[in-house]
Amino acid sequence: MNASPSPYQIKAFTYVARERSFSRAAQTLNVTQSSVTQHVAKLENLMGTQLFIRRREGLELTRAGIELFSITDRLATLDQLVTEKVNDYNALTDGSIRLIANAPRPAMPIIARYGELYPKVQIDFTLYDWTTAMTLLNERQVDMAIVTEPQENPALVTHELRRSKYMVHMRADHRLAKEPVLSLVDLQTETLVLPEDGSLTQRVVNRKIKKHDLTFQRILKTTTFPMVKEALLHGLGVGLLLENSLYPSDNLVAIPVHEMPEEYRDCVVIPRDKKDLRLIQSFLGVCIDGSVSAPQTSARN
């Protein structure tokens, strides 16, 4: 007869996978770190495979760990839902939400507003490129994501927040800054600043360049959207980014691009079985309220 893992082993593994840390998992579960370590070690021994790889920057799930976590995280979510129903509490006094996004905005204004309303709830927020963000969502390694044009997946629930177009961003003193509309042809002599590989922006821009048979001699790739903004502010080039994806600055302008009239959806995306959690519902409410009352987008960034 095959041995079955204990509930303690499953719970320890799930929280280590969530927190990417044995010590933080122990703190969350209010047990000793050695207890968590032993439970995970016994589970690995029972399965005959390693579930985590220890790297300098933290723990990484193995393929077996990812597959197991996709199941055990659902159990932990169901357990949390049961606890909420039993307690039937009215006020959000603690807890945490693991949130990711593929751009600083609209995520950061929403986080700021949520923090005002629920100051005791911790938001663990990280920026990732679009490809990584979708992978983390599909592997259930986060609670929510604010992503542009997310992939369709029946296991995910999507709520549209706003729509925006790609525009060329540049310093206000740039020679093209006064133009009402620009063409990609106008930008061929400029250094084009783009986010990192895996970003939706890079995919969209590369498709447009190929479609119109254009050549850009100088393309500068940066790691994150804040780095793109810094590059633009320092006059390193021009950027093709969604309007209002950066924090407003009087030193930057955004101009429509003739070949890029399409609108793209910014959405909040949640694993379907997490959508009824009280914390998730509270954050979603702020997202939706913000999308209704947000000011109209403008060309200035």
Image: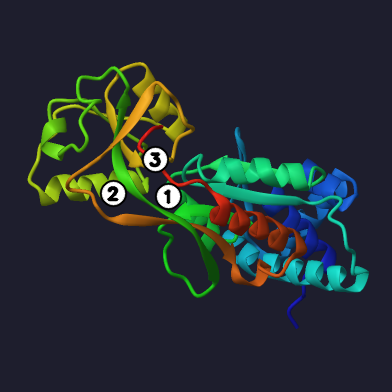
Mark before the other along the chain sequence, 2 or 3 = 2
Name the residue that disc number 1 marks.
130
Disc 1 is placed on an element classified as helix
Q: Is residue 44 above or below residue 31?
A: below
Name the residue that disc number 2 marks.
203
Q: Position of residue 233 (x, y in %)?
A: 38, 20
Q: 36 or 239: which is nearer to us? A: 239
Q: Which callout, 2 or 3, points to the residue nearer the camera?
A: 3
Point 91% across, 73% down: residue:
86
Point 53% across, 64% down: residue:
159
Disc 3 is placed on an element classified as loop
Q: Is residue 215 above or below residue 161?
A: above
Residue, far bottom = 1
Point 65% across, 70% down: residue:
71
The three-letter amino acid code for the residue at tag 1 is: Trp
The three-letter amino acid code for the residue at tag 3 is: Ser
What's the image's color scheme?
Answer: rainbow
Q: Are marks 1 and 3 in contact (CB under 8 Å)?
A: no
Q: Is residue 247 above or below residue 36?
A: above
Name the residue that disc number 3 marks.
298
Rounded to the nearest whole Å, what is the CA distance between mark 1 and mark 3? 24 Å
The three-letter amino acid code for the residue at tag 2 is: Arg
**Quarter holding the C terminus?**
top left
Q: Are marks 2 and 1 in contact (CB under 8 Å)?
A: yes
